[in-house]
Image (tube, helix red, strand yellow):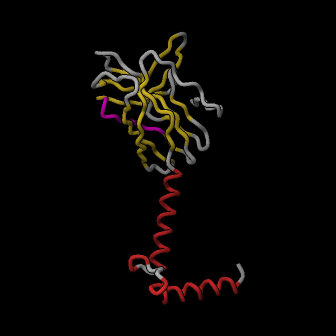
Amino acid sequence: MNARGSRMWMVGAGAMNGGARAAGLNVCGLGLRALASMVVVAASAVAHAQSMPQVSAAWVRGTVSGQSATGAFLAIESSEPVSLVGARSPIAASVQVHEMAMDGAVMKMRPVAAVKVEPGRRLELKPGGYHIMMTGVRSTLRGGERVPLSLDFEGADGRRITVETQADVRDLGAAAPAAPANGGHMRH
């Protein structure tokens, strides 16, 4: 913008500040400076929300009567480096991030302290790989129900973020959903 344009804006802003009430531009008694500050704060909140990990396609395997363990599966994307470091759900006594991996000829499942989510990459938690293990499940989970999940992430700066999501319960015999068309894949 040229100096004249900037000056015109400044003059316009000054004129509005003085005549804002007459023009109906003084929102709830706030001047333009206060309104501008609110816009900056709102833009900052939007930027923060966009930098949070995004969780999609969350589902939980259904259970039968007396079954006390199940798994939750989902996809995570983030614009910044984060690690999934924990999970919680009110439907289970214990919720952990787990990995299934081959140890020789034996498939083993074990808890992991963290799973890295690389910026711009899709991390899939799916059967046979990383997943959320839920034990001490308090009731039978049936297809069509929804399960609340809280996922804890840690950023490269050590800041902790919790993302809340709802996972669809799929009947015990239901197949895992098909891989996304965008070529999503699991990262180790």
Query: Which image quadrant for residue 164?
Result: top left
Q: Which residues are magenta?
A: 84-91
Height in image: 161 above or below 89? Answer: below
**Main secondary structure found in the magenta portion:** strand
Residue sitting at 64 percent across and 86 percent down?
Answer: 8
Residue sitting at 39 percent across and 76 percent down?
Answer: 28
- Image position of 74 (left or right of 6): left
Height in image: 14 above or below 143? Answer: below
Work out which residue is located at the far right of the displayed protein and give it: 2
- Residue 166 or residue 187, whichever sits in front: 166
What x and y, as percent, mark residue 168? 43, 30
Work out which residue is located at the far front of the displayed protein and give it: 23
Query: Which image quadrant for residue 87?
Result: top left
Q: How many marks?
A: 0
Residue sitting at 31 percent across and 29 percent down?
Answer: 92
What x and y, as percent, mark residue 29? 39, 80
Height in image: 88 above or below 36? Answer: above
Query: Is 87 a magenta residue?
Result: yes
Query: Is 24 a magenta residue?
Result: no
Image quarter in which the C terminus is found: top right
Image quarter in which the N terminus is found: bottom right
What x and y, as percent, mark residue 82? 51, 44
What x and y, as percent, mark residue 137? 31, 24
Residue sitting at 61 percent across and 43 percent down?
Answer: 120
